[in-house]
Amino acid sequence: MNPGEQKKALDAWETSARYWDKYRALIAQMFAPLTSGLVEEARIGIGQNVLDIGGGSGEPSLTISCIVGPTGSVMYTDPVAGMVETAQAEAGRRGLTNIQFRQCSVDDLPFPDKTFDLAIGRLSAMFFVDPVKAIREALRVVRNDGCASFAVWGPKEANPFFSTVNDVFDRFVESSTEDPDAPDAFRFAAPGKLAGILENAGAKNVIERQLNFQIEAAISFDQFWQLRTEMSETLREKMAGLAPAQLPTIKQAVADAARRYFVSGKMSFPAEALIVSGKKSAV
Ligand SMILES: C[S@@+](CC[C@H](N)C(=O)[O-])C[C@H]1O[C@@H](n2cnc3c(N)ncnc32)[C@H](O)[C@@H]1O
């Protein structure tokens, strides 16, 4: 990724920030099993000092702040100003006092060596420009007995929350040729790929766990459609390139593909993620 592409990617997250804020309650609910998976895997508990990398609209920082309690702390980080603002505002509304906020990229964390007990990232590692450098940096700022854990999406086919929409759009709008190593939601879907990156970055005792869960919320198909087409930069771009007459056809095709995931006023998609963790040292 050259500097121009990097800037474009961060600008896209800046535009996304208002939608991630708009849907924060749904996001927290839908992806809560990923937070639980990280908390379990990294053994997060009372009194720990946790670094959250790429915290977006605030998760998992906001949840973890309650888990570590007043004797612990969370350092939320994200390179995108709009994300930091919305996450910080939410922490203020909730009266949380054990979270701090820093606008920074994982490539260059503004913290001394061994500052945190552990580092985590929920759905952010796939967007790191140089993942080996990023993981090295995450390990640098955790204690010698600390670890780094990342939650990333499994394969597209196992994640119809995304594929039911994306596959239909792909039929109507040409996609640019996909570089499997470019930042993308499914960049680390292949088993072993992110684990290999942690090992290259010097992590020890690397473990990869598959997490199967349901993405659930009491929303209609129309609400799902709006959420997906607003939150995703790729879909926003594709929508902008469509003739107005195409949109109802596409929406109907997605509705047909997604019908079985909407029953009795409730959305429930099966989902698959990987939780990949490594220790700073083999002690
Ligand atoms: C899919 S969102 C996930 C946000 C949040 N962790 C969640 O699970 O709801 C990805 C986040 O990664 C952040 N991100 C992108 N590039 C990054 C980088 N180089 N360093 C740290 N975070 C980055 C984005 O700004 C965005 O907030």
Image: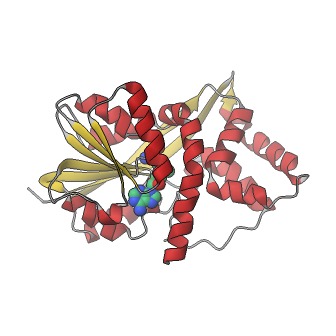
Q: Residue 229: horizontal and vertical position, in percent?
A: 69, 47
In the displayed image of the protein, which residue is found farthest to the right? Answer: 245
Q: Position of residue 283 (x, y in %)?
A: 8, 55
Q: Would you say residue 169 is visible in this rendering?
A: yes
Asked if residue 208 is positioned above or below residue 131 in the image, the reply reads above
Which residue sits furthest left?
Answer: 283
Is 127 above or below relative to 260? below
Residue in the foreground of this view, choosing between 248 and 11:
11
Residue at the spot x=21%, y=33% of the render? 45
Give the number of callouts: 0
> Residue lying furthest bottom in this view?
2
Residue 270, percent from left and from top: 55, 39
Q: Is residue 225 left or right of residue 193?
A: right
Residue pictured at 27% horizontal, 41% vertical = 74
Horizontal side of residue 147 vs 53, given as left or right: left
Please give left or right for residue 146 compared with residue 16 in the image: left
Residue at x 35%, y 26% (from the top left corner): 95
**Image quadrant of residue 176?**
bottom right
Q: Is residue 153 visible?
A: no
Asked which colour scheme the image uses, the reply is secondary structure
Nearest the camera: 203 or 231?
Answer: 231
Does residue 72 appear to the left or right of 207 in the view shown? left
